[in-house]
Structure formats: structure tokens, C-alpha cells
Amino acid sequence: MSTYIQIDPTQKLDPFKAVKKLPLEEYFTSGHRTCQGCESALVMKMMAKAAGPRTIVLGSTGCMYVANTTYYSTSWVLPWMHTQLGSSGSAALGTAAALKALMRKGKMKKEPINVIAFCGDGGGADMGVGAISATLTHPDYNCLILMYDNESYANTDIQLSGSTPWGANTTFSTPGKVKRIMHRRWKKNMAGMMAAGHPTCRYVATVCMSYALAGMNAMRKALSIGGPTFIHSLDPCPKGWDYDPYLSHEMGELAVNTGVWPLYEVEDGVLRLTGRTQQIAAGKIKRQPVRDYLLKQGRFAHFTNDDIDYFQSKVDEMWGKWLVPGVIPFQREVEADNPPA
Amino acid sequence: MGRLFAIEIIYRGIFQKTLATRLSRSIVLAAHQEGKMGISFGRYGDSPERNGIPAKNFAIVATDEQTLQEGMAKYEPKQVDVTIAVDDTLCKGVESWAWYGLQPVNRLLKPGGTLIVTSREGPDAIIAMAHRKETPYNLAIVKGTVSFSGLWVYKDDHTDVRILGAIAKVLPDLFSLTSVQKVIMDQWKDAIKAESAARAYERIGTTTVRTDQGNPEVPYKFDFPKWHEMGEGIAIPSIPAGRNMEDPVSHVHGGFQPDRNPTFKKFSTRTMRPVVNFDTCIKCTLCWLHCPDSCFDVTPEGLYDANMQACCGCGVCEAVCPVKECVTMVNETEFGDNASQWEAWRNDKEGYQAWLAKKIESHPERSHGFRYRGQYEEQVPEMLEIARKG
């Protein structure tokens, strides 16, 4: 990295060694208005725990804004501020820059403070992708952008987003009698895009909070490495995915074990598959069939066997044909794509 | 001036959204069969709904247009003729999304109005759950397994039509059974559903609930801040960091109890609650770590006590617990208070084990939506059979 860039020191956040060594304190606590079994609320809790008390959190519109802070009441222990739907990137950068300027001018004590901006998949992958991209090109500001991805605009009752998987039932893609599959686009590869497109960004990771320790350690690394960083978290959503809330934890595990959700980190340009994904790639464990994942969710209840096979073939493609399996969707030869009619 | 009818449907957000919509819509359509006009709507403050958090739908019907207009120009009616609670645990109180505190389930009922509840419990259990009311009201139970499904797949277990049949009996001025059956046939073309409505009509009985019956507790509430107390830029004070816990027996301090949002407690979202066997707990931390609602207090000896003011009953703790029957979800109807299980255990371990065994034994399974494809098809015949037996 060029020498003229002035990075402030970050907090020293060593990885947590074991779940039993985790701090007991909660910085995001009870009394939020989320669904039973909300995994995104769990991500907020883990994020706050991983970052610790010297942290500023900015949240763009979405479930984690509306459920946690409306009606003059909150469950945040950390200082938190709302920002508009598409502006998590700008808010993170602006806050980091402001802290830097205030400290330089002596108006604030010099100390490393974590800046985290979170956004949902609607606020991040759809509306905020420009601002997030811009922020990731500014290497001299320390901030983390965390995208909690529940695969739809869940707050406003499940409209499809750029992150919704193929074929899923949403308010905008209700299956009909004549046309069964009303959503024919594939999920945006947000983490891959951020990692591939931003050489100045030192850390990009995908996480799933069913694997809590790894997820929190990814957040700690993202906050302490320096410069802007990006984390994409897949959050099973009992409301929009339509499953019994007690399955929330299992649904995250299934997403990883079926290979639908690859876990990886890109640190200073070096890709490392992590956790179960690494074991799958190394051939130590077999990928579970996606059928196990799809049939547990009401949003796929209209799928025929052909649809399930097609979904499976696309996941197989991701692992067998992509140049960087699970991460970058380039292929040497493009084959014909034949979704079921 | 004509007559105004108001009916409220209290339901579990998302889980019973389709059920509540079908009900309030069909109520208006059935009344329309008899020349009345009406409107069916959801309470604005309950949207966006969250799984399990209580929500309300209303059906407002009038004999003429002017009365209807007068009756519907409200956020929610001041009084209702019939309150329908489509889940019996709602009788413990309704803390909706939108900042009201805990409201008694019978709060809006007119003197002499009827509370219709779907439940497998008898009247005594339901009356004990509901808060006391200053005027007598009637209770009618539509016997059956409580109907839960999700946003996309509806479980058609006849709960909707059975309640419609019950309304025709308890409020005959609104509509007759014939109108209900006509609406059922128009909408779903299902003679078996029409028959279910007739059976509910014949079977439904009411019990009068006196003013000295019910839960005597004052439901928790809080003071709304005045406009001049509100901070600049809508700044809200954050939650304090939390504190150590104190052991009720040894008075040792330790562990951690987080402070919690004082204006939204979420426990009325719960339909099942975890009971914890502290003697078999291996302190693996998983329930505490994976609870999305941070409801576990960490005790001085490192056990995890599910705080019943904060638990919303999702069941993730039971799902992640590696020890058999260490954390078990039990039907919320089995409990009368929100007391700490850990304190009970500390004070009397044997007594606690006996209590625990009894609770675990009595847990009728409650399904909270879609678990696998084909599940509803398996459940519905059994639910219909229970309904048929009454």
C-alpha cells in the first residue's frame, strides 16, 4: 500500500479462543421487535459482542433498524444511528472520517473506535452497492460494512431483492397455477463482487451465525486489519423463508453443508475457504443434497422435482465449473442453461 | 342511527396472518349476505408483522352507511362485541409491536360481550390466564388444536369456518349460520367446511366470566415520554450495560444479567417456554450464545437461566442444546408466572426436579409453522378429528 495513506491504529481484537472464553457482556440486548428465532438479531448481538464497547454502529433501513429502534425505544447498548436505505457505505466512511478529523484537531481523545455500518440485502446488495463500493476504495478510513442477508425485503413483508434465490416465493413472485416459477434470477454474488472489485479493501468474508465463533472472529479481524472491510452474513429468516423458528440454527448449517452458502475470507488478496466449506472443498465431507435444505422451507413448497434438480445443478456448477469454486462465477466454457418450464 | 358491530381478531403475527385475514373478510361477507355493510382491516401499528408477536384484525359492520363511516374512522374501535383469540396463550395478554405495554385480551370487550378462544383447554384454564375485567363477559371455546402456519403455505384445518359458525351462535344479530355457509360455499366451494361451521354452531357454549375471576395482576405498562422530554434529533437513551447476579441462597455475586429494553418485553409473543434442567447442564454456553433475544441470564456458578420477561419462545435453545431434555420447550398454558427457574432450583432442588418432570411430561406438542413438505397434510386429519370430537 502507498505510504502517503495515513491509517489510524485500530483496536487490538485478538480472535476469541473458544465459546467458553467469550465475554458475558451484551451490547445489543433483549427487547427488540424481531420475529421469534430471528437470525439477523443474533448477528447484531454477535457483532456487538465481537466489537466491544468502544464502537459506533450505523444502521440503514431494514428489519434491524425498524425492529430495534422504533417507537422511542431500543435494545442497543452501543451508540447507534439510523442512516438511509442505500447509504450504509457513505455513513461508515463519513463517520470514520469525522472521528479522524475530530481526533486530529484535538476535539476528541485519540483512541481507536470501531465504526460498523450494517445493511440488509435490500439496502446493501440492491440500493447501497454503489456507496459500499466507493467506501471500499478509500483505504485510509477504518470501518466495517456488515450486510445481513435474509434474502428478501423482510421488513416490509418479503418482497424479492437481488439476493433472493431462484424460484423462491415472495410477495413479488407468488407462484401461480399457470406459471410456477415467478422469480427467475440468481442471487447476487455480493461478497465475491466486493472482493474481486476492490484491491484496496484488505478483508472480505462470508459468515453464517450458526457458526458463531468463526463469525465473530471474522468480524474482529475485519475491525482490526485497518481500512474499510466488508462482511456478508447469510441469515435464515423464519418469516420470509417460512419455517418453524426453532429451525433457525439448523437452516444456517444446512445452507453451508449443502454448499449453497460457501464460507470464505479474502485477506489482502489471499482467498481462504473456511469452516465446513473448507472441509467440503477438501473432500473431507460430502456436500448434502440441496433437497434437504429446500424442502424445509415454505418459500420453496411449490418446487417440483425438476425445480429441485435444476437448483442442485446450479449449485453443482458453482462447485464444479466456477474458476474459483464457490467464490467467482467465471467459467471456461459456458454451457446452455435450461431451467424447467 | 343504525347498529354498529365490531369484532376484533387477535392473532399471532405471520403464523396466523392468513387465518385472521380469512376470518375478518368472511365476517364482513357473511354480514353482507344479510344486507349489512362492513370493512375488514388490520391494525396499522401491527405492520410489519413479526412471527409470533400479537397482532389484530378488525371487522366493522353496520346496518347503514352512515353508522359504518362513523364506526370505521378509528385506529381501533373503542369497544367490540366479540373478541376472537385464535391462540389460547394470547389470553395472557397482548403486547403488540407498537409500544402499548401489555394489554388484557378482553380489554375492548363490551359488558356482556363474548371472547371466543380456540384451545384444547377448558374454561377454567382460559379464565385464569385472562386479566380481570371490571364488567362480566362471556367466554366461548372453540375446541381444537391451535392453528399455526406460515406466510406462504396455509394449513387449512377448518379453524376459520368453525369460528365463523361460533360467531353466528354468539352474535345472531350479525349473521345467521345460513349466511356463513353461503359465504363458505362461495369462497371455497367446500361442503365439508360448511359442515364444520354448522357443527361448531351447534356445539359452542358460553360461560359467564365474573368480575372476581381471572388474573388479578396489573398488566405491565410504562409512561410515555412527553414531547418536551424527547431529546434533540430523536435521540433515545441507550440501555445500560447490565450487572452481576446474586445467588438467592449463598448471596454470592457473579455471572451477568443484561439490562433490557424497559418498554418492550416480548414475553407475550411466547407460546412455548424453555424449562431448564440445571442438574444436567454441562455449561456448554450454546443456548446463551444462540439466543437471538439475549434472554439467558448467566448465574454466578455459570448456569444459564432463561429470563421469562425476555424469552419469546422461539425454541432455538432447545434445538442447539446437546444434552437430552436439558432444555425442553413446554406449552405456555402450563405456567402461571414469569418467575426465575434458577432461583426455584437454588431454593429447593428436589422440589424443582419434581416440578420440572411434571412440566416436561405434560407438554402437548405445538407446531409453529412449516417444518417439512407434507407436514400440514399429515396434521390436518388429526386436527379435524379433535375438532369433530369437540
Image: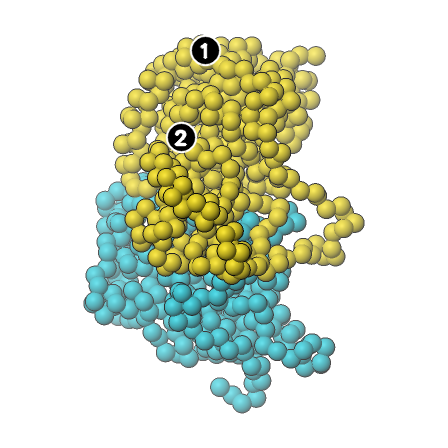
Chain colours: A cyan, B yellow
Q: How dense is the environment of label 2, judged by Cα within 10 Å: few (below 14), some, or many (20 and up)?
A: many
Quick check: B322 above or below A138? above
Q: Residue at position x 27%, y 57% from top?
A: A258
Up-down relation of residue B123 to residue B12 (above or below):
above
Seen in the picture, residue B155 relative to B208 is either above or below; the reply is: below
Please give left or right for residue A192 compared with residue A81 in the image. Answer: left
Where residue B139 appears, x then y in whole percent? 51, 19
Chain ID at mark 2 = B
Q: Where is residue A305 in the image (x, y as percent from the top left)?
A: 23, 44
Q: Which amino acid does label 1 sit on?
A: Leu
Q: In this view, does B339 lie to the left or right of B136?
A: left
User: Mark 2 = which residue?
Assistant: B147
Q: Which of A53 and A140 is in front in this view?
A: A53
Q: Name the residue under label 1.
A: B177
Residue B40 appears in the rendering: no
Residue at 42% over, 68% down: A21
Residue occupying the point 51% across, 78% down:
A12
Q: What residue type is labelled 2?
A: Ser
Extreme residue toward the bottom, this view: A3
B22 or B357, which lies in front? B357
Mark 2 or mark 1: whose residue is earlier in sequence: 2
User: What residue lies at 54% left-to-right and 15% top-to-bottom?
Assistant: B208
